Image (cartoon, rainbow, N blue to C red):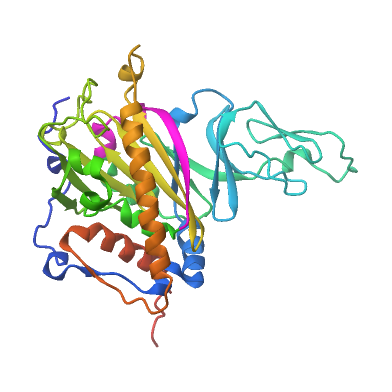
Amino acid sequence: MTRASSMFDLIGQQDDQRAYYDTGGRGRSHAFYTGEEQYRREMERIYGRRWLPVDHVSRFPEKGSYVTLTIGTGSVLIINGDDGIQAYHNYCRHRGYRLVEEAAGKRQSLVCIYHCWVYDRNGKLKSLNGTYFDHFFDKEKNGLLPVRTEVRYGVVFITFSDDAPDLDASLGEFGEFARVYELADLKCVQAKDYPVASNWKLVAHNVNESLHFPTAHKDLHRITDFDDAGTYELKGDIVGAWQVIRDSYNSVSMTGRSQRAPMPLVPEADLKKINWITILPNLLFGFTADYVMMQWVWPESPSTCIVRHFWLFHPSETAKSDFSHEAVFALWDKANYEDWELCERTHRGLSNPLWSPGQLSLDEEVVSQIDAWVARETADPVENEG
């Protein structure tokens, strides 16, 4: 397949005269960022209704491979069963005991250690050891409760709703980025969770702008040029931006240099770029020519969240005897802790009811796009007049 000259050749025409560039944008209210009511609406109308990206297929290499995930106060188990990857509510059907606490692993049976109910890797109830029921109990109807699950471009999606918006329409132009970076074929070589004492939206803001690189991330700033960057206008429930890697470097890592071959379909003009693409509400991709990072932010409460970070590489590189991702991990792990301090201090500032929204610069368009999307999704329906 012929390599495109740029990602701009593969997506819709960009409007360089769009309205945001006239005035920039503004932040939103104290209540929007830290309020209990706004958080309740987000959990109900976004996280409770929309398709949510939750993992990558490379984390489920064998039957019985599983991961767990906390969303708000709920826990989800995602497991590779006989019919493929399927998500379930991570609770025993008997008394609600949380089945699996580990973040990831492999099991062929799921045992509730409270009363020893046993489920297979397909969510079916196999045994009720130690529990006695009369004839009214139907074991077939007491398997794990499934959560709607789909896979697109190597990304696992779930939804808790029966009327979620169309997934493919929501993804819009994301498939073009997934295709050229061969996302479905990549291998996750490391994952790490970070607790952050901040509202989830502030993390989403932080990871979608690079204005803070010169002051907060000396290692990133040395390798990437925050001033040679721009914002995409993308179709679907996605937002994005791009940023150039400085001339003397070829990889975003602690060394800035890599012997890894660039992925063959990455456009020529993007070999020295990071393409920052976010699937709303909460999954950021950092697409680079030699690896891809995925970073989720999962809300726990109005003031706390968990950030889950993956690092993915092409299998032709991970198969090499001298493969190493340590320089990549070292850079991002350090930058992450720098970011979390920024987000936590920002949350403490926005928690003041006297906070007055500030002006956003022309380089913070994605921050404005995220807030506008959340506001639309959580707004009350307009009632018909008359």
- Residue plotted at (22% across, 20% down): 259
Relative to 257, 144 lies left or right: right
The stretch in magenta equals 176-197
Instruction: Report the residue that reaches farthest toward the top.
Output: 321
User: Looking at the rendering, which quadrant does residue 202 occupy?
Assistant: bottom left
Q: Quadrant of the C terminus?
A: bottom left
Can residue 237 be seen by looking at this rendering? no
* Rendering coords of residue 213 (x, y %): 23, 49
Relative to 356, 190 lies left or right: right
User: Looking at the rendering, which quadrant does residue 293 occupy?
Assistant: top left
Of residues 333 and 56, the one drawn nearer to the viewer in this rendering? 333
Of residues 104 and 110, the one drawn nearer to the viewer in this rendering? 104
* Rendering coords of residue 154 (x, y %): 39, 33
Relative to 48, 242 lies left or right: left
* Rendering coords of residue 5 (x, y %): 9, 34
- Residue plotted at (33% across, 43% down): 335
Can residue 139 be seen by looking at this rendering? yes
In the rendered image, residue 79 lying in the magenta stretch gets the answer: no
Q: In which quarter of the image is the N terminus?
A: top left
* Rendering coords of residue 119 (x, y %): 71, 34
- Residue plotted at (46% across, 63% down): 42
In the rendered image, residue 189 lying in the magenta stretch gets the answer: yes
Of residues 346 and 150, the one drawn nearer to the viewer in this rendering? 346
